[in-house]
Amino acid sequence: MSRIFKRPMFRKGGPTNEGIMTGIVDREMHAVSDPGGVGSQSAKERILRAYEEQNVPTVDPLTQFLLDYGRTLSETRPSGGNFATLLKATGKPIESLSQNIGAREKEKRKLGLEGELIDIEQAGKKALQDEKIQAEKDLLKMQLGAKQATDFQTYLDQYQGSSVQAKNRAKFENESLEAIANDKFGSSYEGFIGGIHGRTKDYEKKSNLGKVYYDVTNGTFKRLRRSADDKYGFETLNVKTFDTEADKKINQPQLSEFAKKTNKAIEERRKIKEAEEKQKRLDFLGEQPFYSDPFGA
């Protein structure tokens, strides 16, 4: 036992990858060197890296060229001087070297293309999976949101314990009535009325004519109008069946009887004036000597 603790790995300050720990490598800091994680490399990168690691030639290209060149030179019959002989001997070795390099590059391109296809396929699958997960999250969120929106007790404190007002407010939020009101009534929609929002009577004034409110006391939309006898009052609107264009036609400004009579008298006076002006022009032309026969016939 005493010999065991004398081994280098147990010595203070000694190396830890020796003895029985031979071959064990230190942990790499992938969080720093590879922020995306160990598996963040694409299929193309992994395939090409494996190719480079596994397809290592036993002899490097330059050494192989020199070996081929030496053998070819020894078999080449001298002709045309030493330089010409040396140059002639390089033919086949250079051709062989080019073929080897070309074949290696062709194989790398093929593997790279296959890796790209794998990456594209995996990216498509991941995108579909991400969309599915996001859709499930959105559905769950909507379900949880709907469950919370229907709980009128959320608004009990706000409406001072009035369950009627709290339920109408919950209905307003749960059925997205605010968005519908903005779409149907536009800028005429003002917000809440009744209960803690103020008595409807307090809103009956000229500045609020045509404005629409949601009454939390009965859960209806109301619009302030003025009757023919100049009295203010609220009319109830059905937000789901409300027709904006039809409402514009119905509620066009109506003239009073006095205004109608005045406009009629103005129109009659205008016609009389036009007739008088026309007669004056005719009388003037009739007094001219050439009027009866302006062409001298």
Image: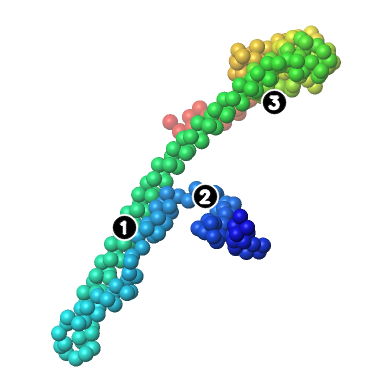
| Crowding at mark 3 (Cα within 10 Å: few <14, some 14-19, many 20+) | few
Q: Nearer the viewer, mark 1 or mark 2?
A: 2
- Quadrant location of residue 279? top right
Q: Horizontal placement of 33 versus 237: left or right?
A: left
Q: Nearer the viewer, mark 3 or mark 2?
A: 2
* Discs 3, 2 touching: Cβ within 8 Å: no
- In this picture the colour scheme is rainbow
Q: Amino acid at mark 2?
A: Val
User: What residue appears at the point 21 percent right and 90 percent down from the top-left corner?
Assistant: 82
Q: Can residue 283 be spotted in the picture? A: no
The residues bearing labels 1 and 2 have C-alpha atoms spaced at a distance of 26 Å
Which residue lies under the disc numbered 2? 38
* Discs 3, 1 touching: Cβ within 8 Å: no
Q: Earlier in the sequence, mark 1 or mark 2?
A: 2
* Residue 187 circle label: 3
Which residue lies under the disc numbered 1? 107
Q: Is residue 174 above or below residue 231?
A: below
- Quadrant location of residue 101? bottom left
| Crowding at mark 2 (Cα within 10 Å: few <14, some 14-19, many 20+) | few
Q: Residue 60 at what x, y percent from top left?
A: 34, 70
Q: Amino acid at mark 3?
A: Ser
Q: Residue 254 at what x, y percent from top left?
A: 69, 14
53 and 180: which is toward the camera: 53
Residue at the far bottom in the pictured view: 81
| Crowding at mark 1 (Cα within 10 Å: few <14, some 14-19, many 20+) | some
User: What residue appears at the point 31 percent right and 62 percent down from the top-left corner?
Assistant: 104
Q: Amino acid at mark 1?
A: Glu
Q: Horizontal placement of 163 versus 289: left or right?
A: right
* Discs 1, 2 touching: Cβ within 8 Å: no
